[in-house]
């Protein structure tokens, strides 16, 4: 089922938590709503579920306006961050709940419910744990029960609110991959909320980034990662070096060097270029290209990656961060105090006033 | 099962030590004294139909009062926790007054309110309903003094419940009533029962507020504590202790039953609620 | 869920019930207290007997509340964090003082400490008086109010589970709450015994 949201605005008192949101989730898509806390992403998800009501705007499921349909009649599966399992019921009764509360004429028979529960237990890899109580399960297992419970009613849309937020790193990664597989198996249109950019880029087909109640950028994970459209996006998606400079006819002039840029900027504008640490390479000798002169001040190898801090010798003499693979680092035999040339492989440039957000 | 937590010997030890002095020794003394008066004197004291009538009234009126408080206590707790409305703080403050007020004062107030010429009594009199000086009056007084228990027991539990659980049930298609029955009620039952048990216990022992509204007609509106008081005034210590021991034994059995039920329900009710909604 | 629909109805029922059972009786007491004018009211609460009663009440509260609070915490901890045989029995025993009428409580203490009581002779020999004196009032109050805090804390701790942090939060919040709850009834009993 596809979801279309048009002109959704939500005010809590005087604060606008969502400002005129428009988006579409295609049938069978796995979409991530990504944003820092307070960006409105959870409110938006709860609105799709019918747990919150918009101040303005409409929500459509497959073209049918469901804005005023009750949560219980929307047939959505919802997974809460803290599981929200029924602690007084066994796992199998948790899963069966949605089927048992159906009206008599729609309710499956007892054996049907039982086989459905077993099927779901198998799907979420919890076979044999049906007789346990939620308190006897680990966090990851609880979240899988919550998921099975929401899938039992064969929802037309599956919504997950920070589903892995309460779990530790290892379990998170496992469940992430598993969610992808599960999504492929079931094909249910799925929206999940997360504040973890790695999680969003890893799991989703499509990512929507929210900040301050507005959509900042949307697209496939690789599009989002490769072409951030704003300083916010650069900072939110990970570390980025900020290099202040001016736009010239040739490109962007930063300290002593000019970087060629196809982006149009008016001559003489103050701009800031964002460069990711791993999109900088180092060399001992200057080539033909435009290289920044730096002095290595710190190296910190972590597994396959080496984090390097260096001080620019031109212009502002700022610290910049560089990430090299262990191999490249070893080939260059870098020592602290070395004078080197840093080459910017890729960058994004924005007006300096945009920088002030 | 959960013995990993520290402090069991200390907390358990202190509890038992304290209870020995405040509860065990006095109660054992009572039973001891009763045994001292001999079987015949004991039987004579309690086989009086007046004692039977008083026991019946005390237990039935207390039970009805506890039931009324169970229903309305839950309602009030719900309204206080879940809604915002004008007068909420006043309502919240009012709940504890039956605890704060000297019960005799409450008794006088209730009597003047429900007497035939009182504000409410005069409205009920034309309908042929007499409240003051009848078992209904006793029940009303007992409801009054037990009112805070269920409210104050249920409130914190209701507040600590995760509302996401209810949302989850709603999203699975459950109606508000079903959610209440299958998700909320099972979780609240232990607190409701605990509150009712306390209200019941408190009602059994209540004296001050009842004597005025009851009228204390032997065989009709005489409660057990009053009967004991009568015996004491006549220096019939043997009779008083005999009745007191019977009262104690009956209350103990009932309270123990209620507690075991509570414990059992808190383990099983959730399952049952879902099953019975089929 | 959509309990908002029932909101006005539920609030109305709660108010109606409270009006009948609480508000009207209170109004009558209030009217009664001031019916003879404020001066009579003021005189009656400042006369020596009343002042003594108020002092005694406060004394009883000061002795009873801390002890009961300590007991309540210990009992709630022992009874909710651990499972053992006889748990329900102990909870019931904590409740018993409620069901035991203050009349019976008084009787029991006379049996124990009265002139003809178990400890009567020993007390007389040591020139100690409990019955018809302050210690008697305190003892009776302690007996009758014993269940208050413990019984309030038990379901709260039960609902909170064994999470140590949550439990301590509960204790912080619960402590205040119970103080409030045990203070008031203790005051009441002080009045009553007077």
Image (cartoon, grey):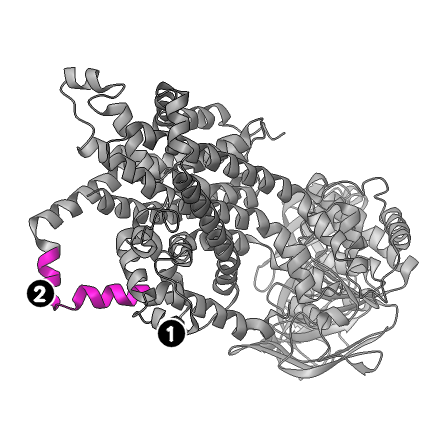
- Find disc 1 in the rendering and name its residue: B123
For the residues marked 2 and 1, what is the alpha-carbon distance in whole angstroms?
34 Å
Residue B102 in sight in this render: no
Main SS category, magenta section:
helix
Q: Are marks 2 and 1 in contact (CB under 8 Å)?
A: no
Q: Nearer the viewer, mark 2 or mark 1?
A: 1
Q: Is residue C75 above or below residue C36?
A: above
Q: Is residue B85 left or right of residue C69?
A: right
Q: Which quadrant of the figure has residue C172?
A: top left
Q: Give residue A311's position: percent from left, percent from top.
A: 61, 54
Q: Is residue B48 above or below residue C27?
A: above
Who's the residue at 24% across and 24% down the image?
Answer: C113
Q: Which residues are magenta?
A: C25-44
Which numbered dot is residue C39?
2
Query: Is C31 part of what is drawn in magenta?
Result: yes
What is the quadrant of the N terminus of chain B in the image? top right
Q: Chain of mark 1?
A: B
Which numbered dot is residue A227?
none
Q: Residues within 10 Å of mark 2 (few under 14, many from 20)?
A: few
Q: Give residue C174's position: percent from left, percent from top.
A: 43, 46
Closer-to-camera residue (B98/A229): B98
- Marks 2, 1 in one chain: no
Q: Residues within 10 Å of mark 1 (few under 14, many from 20)?
A: some
Helix, strand or loop at disc 1? helix
Who's the residue at 37% across and 21% down the image?
Answer: B32
Closer-to-camera residue (B33/C126): B33
Q: Is residue B27 left or right of residue B187?
A: left
Residue A174 in sight in this render: yes
Q: Give residue B178's position: percent from left, percent from top.
A: 69, 62
Query: Is A281 part of what is drawn in magenta?
Result: no
């Amino acid at each position: 089922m596809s979801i279309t949201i048009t002109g959704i605005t939500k005010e809590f008192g005087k604060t606008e938590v969502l400002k005129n949101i428009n988006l579409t989730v295609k049938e069978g898509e796995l979409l991530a709503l990504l944003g820092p806390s307070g960006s409105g992403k959870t409110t938006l998800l709860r609105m799709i579920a019918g747990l919150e009501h918009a101040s303005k705007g409409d929500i459509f499921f497959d073209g049918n306006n469901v804005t005023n349909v009750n949560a219980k009649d929307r047939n959505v599966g919802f997974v809460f961050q803290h599981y929200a399992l029924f602690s007084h019921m066994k796992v199998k009764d948790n899963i069966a709940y949605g089927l048992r509360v159906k009206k008599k004429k729609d309710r499956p028979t007892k054996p049907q419910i039982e086989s459905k529960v077993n099927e779901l237990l198998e799907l979420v890899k919890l076979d044999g744990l049906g007789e346990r109580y939620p308190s006897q399960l680990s966090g990851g297992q609880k979240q899988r029960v919550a998921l099975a419970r929401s899938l039992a009613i064969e929802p037309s849309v599956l919504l997950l609110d920070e589903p892995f937020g309460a779990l530790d790193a290892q379990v998170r990664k496992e469940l992430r991959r598993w969610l992808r597989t599960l999504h492929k198996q079931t094909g249910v249109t799925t929206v999940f909320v997360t504040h973890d950019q790695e999680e969003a880029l890893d799991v989703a087909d499509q990512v929507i980034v929210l900040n301050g109640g507005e959509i900042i950028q949307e697209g496939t994970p690789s599009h989002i990662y490769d072409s951030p459209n704003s300083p916010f996006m650069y900072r939110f998606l990970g570390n980025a070096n900020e290099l202040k400079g001016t736009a010239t006819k040739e490109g962007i002039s930063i300290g002593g060097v000019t970087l060629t840029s196809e982006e149009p900027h008016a001559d003489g504008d103050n701009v800031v270029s964002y460069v990711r640490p791993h999109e900088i390479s180092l060399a001992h000798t200057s080539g033909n290209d435009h290289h920044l002169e730096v002095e290595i001040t710190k190296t910190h190898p972590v597994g396959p990656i080496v984090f390097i801090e260096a001080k620019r010798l031109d212009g502002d003499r700022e610290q910049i961060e560089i990430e090299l693979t262990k191999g490249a680092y070893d080939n260059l035999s870098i020592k602290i105090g070395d004078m080197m040339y840093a080459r910017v492989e890729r960058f994004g440039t924005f007006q300096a006033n945009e920088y002030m957000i | 099962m959960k013995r990993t937590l520290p402090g069991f010997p200390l907390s358990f030890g202190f509890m038992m030590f304290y209870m020995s002095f405040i509860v065990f020794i006095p109660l054992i003394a009572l039973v001891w004294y009763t045994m001292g008066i001999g079987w015949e004197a004991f039987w004579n004291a309690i086989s009086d139909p007046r004692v039977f009538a008083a026991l019946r009234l005390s237990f039935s009126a207390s039970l009805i009062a506890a039931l009324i408080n169970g229903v309305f206590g839950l309602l009030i707790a719900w309204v206080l926790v879940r809604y915002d409305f004008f007068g909420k703080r006043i309502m919240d403050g009012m709940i504890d007054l039956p605890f704060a007020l000297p019960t005799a004062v409450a008794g006088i107030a209730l009597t003047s309110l429900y007497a035939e010429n009182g504000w409410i009594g005069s409205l009920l009199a034309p309908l042929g309903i007499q409240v003051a000086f009848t078992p209904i009056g006793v029940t009303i007084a007992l409801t009054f003094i037990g009112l805070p228990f269920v409210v104050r027991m249920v409130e914190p539990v209701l507040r600590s419940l995760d509302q996401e659980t209810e949302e989850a049930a709603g999203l699975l298609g459950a109606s508000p009533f079903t959610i209440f029955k299958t998700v909320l009620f099972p979780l609240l039952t232990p607190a409701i029962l605990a509150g009712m048990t306390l209200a019941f216990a408190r009602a059994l022992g209540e004296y001050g507020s009842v004597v005025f509204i009851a009228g204390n007609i032997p065989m009709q509106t005489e409660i057990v504590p009053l009967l004991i008081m009568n015996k004491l005034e006549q220096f019939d210590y043997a009779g008083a202790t005999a009745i007191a021991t019977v009262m104690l034994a009956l209350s103990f059995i009932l309270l123990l039953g209620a507690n075991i039920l509570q414990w059992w329900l808190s383990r099983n009710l959730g399952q049952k609620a879902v099953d019975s909604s089929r | 869920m959509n309990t908002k629909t029932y909101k006005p109805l539920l609030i109305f029922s709660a108010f109606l019930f409270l009006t009948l059972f609480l508000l009207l009786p209170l109004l009558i007491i209030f009217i009664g207290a001031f019916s003879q004018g404020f001066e009579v009211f003021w005189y009656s609460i400042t006369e020596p007997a009343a002042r003594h009663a108020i002092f005694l009440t406060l004394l009883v509260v000061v002795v009873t509340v801390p002890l009961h609070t300590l007991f309540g915490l210990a009992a709630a901890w022992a009874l909710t964090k651990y499972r053992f045989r006889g748990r329900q029995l102990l909870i019931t025993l904590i409740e018993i003082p409620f069901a035991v009428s203050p009349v019976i409580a008084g009787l029991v203490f006379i049996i124990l400490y009265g002139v003809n009581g178990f400890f009567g002779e020993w007390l007389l020999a040591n020139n100690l008086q409990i019955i018809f004196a302050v210690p008697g009032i305190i003892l009776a109050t302690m007996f009758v109010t014993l269940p208050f805090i413990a019984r309030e804390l038990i379901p709260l701790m039960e609902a909170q589970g064994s999470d140590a942090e949550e439990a301590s939060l509960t204790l912080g919040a619960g402590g205040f709450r119970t103080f409030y709850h045990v203070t008031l009834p203790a005051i009441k009993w002080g009045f009553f015994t007077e």
